[in-house]
Structure formats: C-alpha cells, structure tokens
Amino acid sequence: MSTQQPPQGQQINVELSEKEAEGIYSNLAIITHSPAEFVIDFTRILPGVPKAKVFARIVMTPQHAKLLLNALKDNIEKYEGKFGDIKIAGDTPPSPNFGFQIPTKEEKIH
C-alpha cells in the first residue's frame, strides 16, 4: 500500500485472515480529523435504506494519512495507465444506453 520501503534487509510478513480476505464493500467513506489523527469510516448506502452502517473504522496519524493519499494516487495513476481513465459520475453526460432498456419492436422475439 505505502510507497515507503522498510529499512534495508528488513522483511515484513503481513498476515491476512480468511475473514479479512473476503473484504468489505464500501461506497461511502466519511473522513474526520483532529490534530492527532485521521478517522476514516467505511460504510455503504443502499437505495431505499435511510440509514448507513459503518462496517470498518480506520484511525491513523496525519503522516500515515498523507502516505495513504500518495499510495492511492500512485496506484490510481498505474491503474489508469493500464485500463484507461476512471470515470466519475457527473464528470461526463450519461450514455443513452446505460442501464436497462426497453426493447424496440424489432428486437422483440416473436
């Protein structure tokens, strides 16, 4: 994740348990901060559900938050270099063929 490397010759073993390996889907992150830390709450909002539940909270120092920002920027640049620009809703007009479509008379199966 981070672009920082451990000191020369030091190896870090990262353990990933089965539960954490499944991951948590999030489509909303709420970020707050104080002078000492950044708090990122990962949640998801669903259509028709007026409440959003926090599924994970990450607390980190401002320095680690900035390192995370740099690592995300680096990885997004690599991703877009390989797969193309990531489109953000609202940046471009929606495609007329987006979502479910009602078949035309010619497309209906008789």
Image (tube, rainbow, N blue to C red):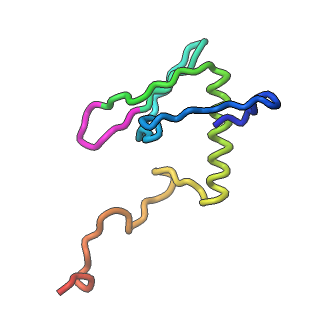
Q: Residue at x 32, y 31 (%)?
A: 52
Residue 47 sits inside the magenta stretch = yes
Relative height, residue 46 to residue 33 (above, below): below
Instruction: Quarter of the image for the C terminus: give it.
Output: bottom left
Q: Indicate left or right for 58 with 47 as reference.
A: right
Relative height, residue 95 to residue 89 (above, below): below
Q: Is residue 30 left or right of residue 99?
A: right
Residue placed most toward the observer, 6 or 3: 6
Q: Is residue 27 visible?
A: no
User: What secondary structure do most residues of the magenta stretch adopt?
Assistant: loop
Q: Position of residue 109 (x, y in %)?
A: 21, 84
Can you name the residue that lies furthest to the right here?
A: 8
* Picture coordinates of residue 92, whole percent (x, y): 50, 57
> Which quadrant holds residue 65?
top right
Position in image of residue 53 (x %, y %)? 33, 29
13 and 29: which one is in front?
A: 13
- Number of numbered discs: 0
Q: Residue at x 67, y 51 (%)?
A: 78
**Looking at the rendering, in which quadrant would you find the N terminus?**
top right
Measuring from the top left, give residue 3's x and y in whole percent.
72, 36
**Magenta stretch: includes residue 95:** no
- Residue 25 visible to the viewer: yes
Which quadrant holds residue 54? top left
With 92 as the anchor, is 74 left or right in this view?
Answer: right
Furthest residue toward left: 110
| Residue under the point 66% across and 28% down | 66
Stretch in magenta? 43-51
Point 59% across, 56% down: residue: 85
